[in-house]
């Protein structure tokens, strides 16, 4: 079965062929890499068990367990991200083909139980590490011990994963917290042939008394966030949000003010243009209200006989109230006519 791994923005698993023990969360993610899964089930005597906290997929559960299943994530294609390589340290991985550069091979042999009655449940499936899988189990590893456990590896951190322990403590990985776990196989009680060779992971084996194999793993999970750092980051985000909101409000008010100012200027210009047009139409008109004397339709009486009625009084008309065809002549001379001129017009002089 093949698990396709989606692209992520984190570090990638190094190039080469190798495998990792599978955690109960499944195979880890990586850039442009597909891990193939596989398993090996081994028959044991009663009493196989794990550490109190164990996250291995297929690990034995309960008491008097008579089988152990190892599950694997195998990288079967050599390509990978050359930017991230296996660096110096003290750790082991599962062997698939040639070991990566600077790793050394080793192996562990389990003398699996062979009950007198009933059938063994030895079984393997999928992609498994290099080894020998028959009525017993032999698995090969690639280990290195050319650096300190404090020399942090750079590996993907999106999902939990396992490395095999080599040395006194777990290898450090950048951004990950490591915890030690183990699995205990109660192997064959009669003529036990447990064995190991080469450079192999941290383990314990006995062929005399308990006749067991105990293998040690390092389980890696993302480090929890620092509470103080989290609080500081929240405060920074809140302050940044308030500053951004204040800037936005300022810009909105500035734009509104600018639009209002522009609108006021337009109104002022429109008023001046309209006034200039009227001034041009009335060009030559004396300042102040000009009053033109216009005789009434009736004959004007002599001053001594002037009537008091408005119909008989002389009419004074403003140029703006006169009809358009009379405004030009009226505006040429806004001075009222003399009394002699009025009499002459009426034919009395």
Image (cartoon, rainbow, N blue to C red):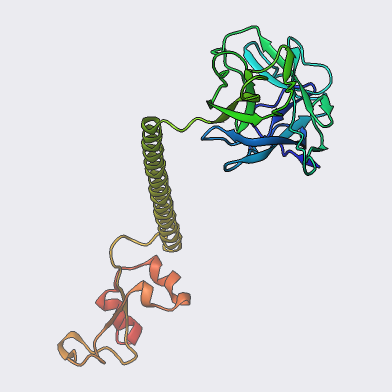
Q: Quadrant of residue 333?
A: bottom left
**For the point 61% across and 35% down, which residue is it?**
47
**For the point 64% across and 22% down, which residue is it?**
164
**Residue at far left of view:** 304
Residue closer to the observer: 198 or 48: 48
Q: Is residue 227 visible?
A: yes
Q: Quadrant of residue 171?
A: top right
Q: Can residue 156 be seen in this view?
A: no
Q: Is residue 323 left or right of residue 56?
A: left
**Residue at far top of view:** 146
Q: Where is residue 304 in the image (x, y as percent from the top left)?
A: 15, 88
Q: Quadrant of the N terminus?
A: top right
Q: Quadrant of residue 298?
A: bottom left
Q: Where is residue 292 in the image (x, y as percent from the top left)?
A: 32, 74
Q: Position of residue 223 (x, y in %)?
A: 50, 30
Q: Is residue 118 left or right of residue 267?
A: right
Q: Quadrant of the C terminus?
A: bottom left
- What is the number of callouts on the image? 0
Residue closer to the observer: 224 or 180: 180
The image shows residue 162, relative to residue 141, as above or below, that is below
The image shows residue 122, relative to residue 109, as above or below, that is below
């Amino acid at each position: 079965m093949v698990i396709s791994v989606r692209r992520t923005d984190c570090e990638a698993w190094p190039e080469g062929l190798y495998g990792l023990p599978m955690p109960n969360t499944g195979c880890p993610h990586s850039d442009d890499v597909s891990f193939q899964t596989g398993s090996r089930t081994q028959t044991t005597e009663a009493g196989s068990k794990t550490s109190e906290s164990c996250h291995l997929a297929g690990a034995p559960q309960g008491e008097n367990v008579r089988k152990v299943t190892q599950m694997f994530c195998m990288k079967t294609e050599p390509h990978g991200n050359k930017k991230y390589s296996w660096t110096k340290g003290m750790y082991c991985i599962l062997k698939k083909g040639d070991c990566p550069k600077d790793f050394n091979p080793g192996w562990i042999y389990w003398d699996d139980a062979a009950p007198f009655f009933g059938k063994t449940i030895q079984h393997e499936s999928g992609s498994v590490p290099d080894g020998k899988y028959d009525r017993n189990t032999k698995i090969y590893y690639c280990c290195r011990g050319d650096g300190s456990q404090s020399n942090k590896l750079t590996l993907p951190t999106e999902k939990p994963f396992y490395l095999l322990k080599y040395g006194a403590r777990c290898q450090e990985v950048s951004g990950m917290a490591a915890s030690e776990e183990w699995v205990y196989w109660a192997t064959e009680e009669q003529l036990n042939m447990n064995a190991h060779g080469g450079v192999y992971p941290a383990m314990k084996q006995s062929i005399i008394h308990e006749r067991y194999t105990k293998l040690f793993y390092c389980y890696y999970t993302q480090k929890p966030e620092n509470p103080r750092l989290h609080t500081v980051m929240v405060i920074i985000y809140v302050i940044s949000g308030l500053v951004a909101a204040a800037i936005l409000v300022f810009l909105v008010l500035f734009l509104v003010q600018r639009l209002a100012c522009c609108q006021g200027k337009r109104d002022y210009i429109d008023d001046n243009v309209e006034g200039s047009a009227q001034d041009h139409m009335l060009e030559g008109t004396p300042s102040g209200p000009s009053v033109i004397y216009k005789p009434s339709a009736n004959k004007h009486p002599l001053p001594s006989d002037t009537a008091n009625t408005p119909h008989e009084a002389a009419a004074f008309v403003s140029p703006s109230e006169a009809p358009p065809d009379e405004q030009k002549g009226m505006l040429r001379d806004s001075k009222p006519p003399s009394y002699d001129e009025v009499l002459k017009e009426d034919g009395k002089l």
